[in-house]
Image: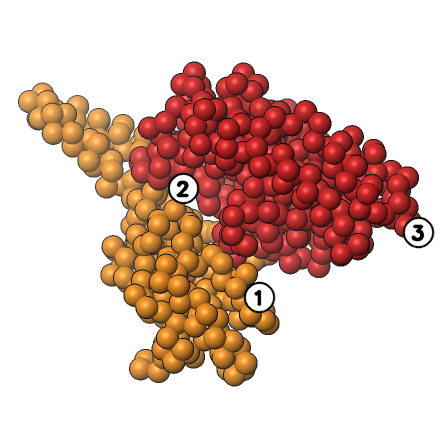
Amino acid sequence: MKQFQYMRPSTQQAVLEAINKPGTKIIAGGTNLVDLMKRGVTAPDKLVDINHLPLKSIAATKTGLHIGALALNSTVSENSLVMQKQPLLSMALKAGASPQLRNMATVGGNMMQRTRCTYFYDITMPCNKREPGSGCGALEGYNRMHSIFGASPQCIAVHPSDMCVSLAALDAVVIVSGHKGERRIPFTEFHRLPGDHPEMDNHLAKDELITGVEIPDNNFAKNSYYLKVRDRQSYAFALVSVAAALDIDNGTIKQARLAMGGVAHKPWRLIDAEKALIGKSVSEESFKQAAEIAMQGAKAYEYNSFKLKLAPATITEALKHASGLV
Amino acid sequence: MDKETPDNEIEDKGILDGTRRDFLKQSTLLTAIALTPSTVVKAAQNGWDEKIAAVYEKVPITMDVNGVKHQLAVEPRATLLDILREQMDLTGTKKGCDHGQCGACTVHVDGCRINSCLTLGVMVSGKKITTIEGLAKGDQLHPMQEAFLKHDGFQCGYCTPGQIMSAVACIREGHANSEMEIREYMSGNICRCGAYPNIVNAIQEVKDGGQAV
């Protein structure tokens, strides 16, 4: 690993000043960044450790739940307020990584993690995300884990997070702090599609720091489910995952939230499928219809066409679990 | 884990705000100017400036490892795993994948299990570390170590220190209530010999025995 300078500024203001310089990166849990530094995928000159900033609290507000950017994934997943108000988030967090990694990884860091595309990780391979202009190794390579929605000829990588899929479904808002003050970004607009700039994973500016997320109160707690399909039962990235949340009244769906992981460069919210569920009765048939709508526009590559069947099946199954059908 | 106590172990502001190297470069430059020109040329040729800077770039940290306080100077890039093994000769903690995928490097930091291969030493300054060497009380093995012996919870033994550290945490966290739960909460520790059924038996026995872990 390349040598770097380690800094631990004492205030948020000092952190904001420090990160605005080239070659500087923030470190929180380090579970992804240290790995990438060991592999030479990234090689910052300076690391700014933000772990001592007071951003760990989890608290109910008048309108929702506020979770600090430095709250640990393990802490959030077992927090009583989270389990009571937003069990979908707890389920998604528990489906991610391992207990050891969840004890290190933070909420903000989870949002900032990079894709696990093997061509991004292997510095001998072309990758437009790692090295803009070098090409995409996955496009005609072994693209089994890759995108079926929203990709570009420059990049077909997927976002690896489970937590983010649940937060996208739950209409969360990301709170960021920068030189111009605070900014609130809807979660679904935080991450971006690759387009011509796959090197950019999200819309966070260089001089901005994620300070927390807010999840508005909802009526989904009773009927939420996170279903993750992977190559082994635990501790693997998703082939496809689905966050499903329903508000059901007397067997009729009043509101629905759906998002998918493992299928796009960002958590993939399924707005049209959600709309199709409103007013429908809880039944496998209406779930299958919604899943079909969700799959419109999907495009597979040589090795991931199985996702075209797996994804709708996972949506249907997640909705069955969320609604109590199974 | 929710504590918001500020970490004041490293009081040397020069290191933490990143000015030390610049200061050192300037100060060595001033010294160099005071020297005769030939000495300056020699110093530059030998790259002493960089070497001196590198020595001073080591960051002082304190760690309580298995109940003993240590003061160390570490490079910022040194992982806790490498510091334990290379600087402190605590080689019980194993380096498997070195990328957070296998769990062989699992240790406890302030009571929580983590992957020491992805933890920078500078970031755990002032914290309490427990490694596999810190579980036994003298000659008396920890109940989990006894159970692993009794149930043959290993074959080659390389993953065992990490398995045991994780197993102890698994019970302390309250995640050892069924075989399924144990398997899920031990999934961060890979055993390529496939001793999983015996590992699960060992953990269940310690859990059911109700001994303090």
> Farthest residue toward the right?
A250
The amino acid type found where label 3 is placed reads Asn
| Residue position for label 2 | A35
Q: Is residue A280 left or right of residue A197?
A: right
Say which chain is orange: B
| Residue position for label 1 | B180
Say which chain is red: A
Can you give x and y, in whole percent of width and height, for residue A64 in the image?
78, 45
Q: What residue lies at 90% left-to-right and 39% top-to-bottom?
A: A279
| Residue position for label 3 | A250
* Near-viewer residue (A316 or B127): A316
- Whether labels 3 and 1 belong to a single chain: the reply is no
- Whether labels 3 and 2 belong to a single chain: the reply is yes
The amino acid type found where label 2 is placed reads Asp
Q: Judging from the image, what secondary structure is the residue with disc 2 in?
A: helix
Q: Judging from the image, what secondary structure is the residue with disc 1 in?
A: helix
Report the Cα–Cα distance between label 3 and label 2: 49 Å
Report the Cα–Cα distance between label 1 and label 2: 30 Å
Report the Cα–Cα distance between label 3 and label 1: 34 Å
Q: Is residue B130 visible?
A: no
**Which of the 4 image quarters holds residue A46?**
top left
Q: What residue lies at 66% left-to-right and 33% top-to-bottom?
A: A268
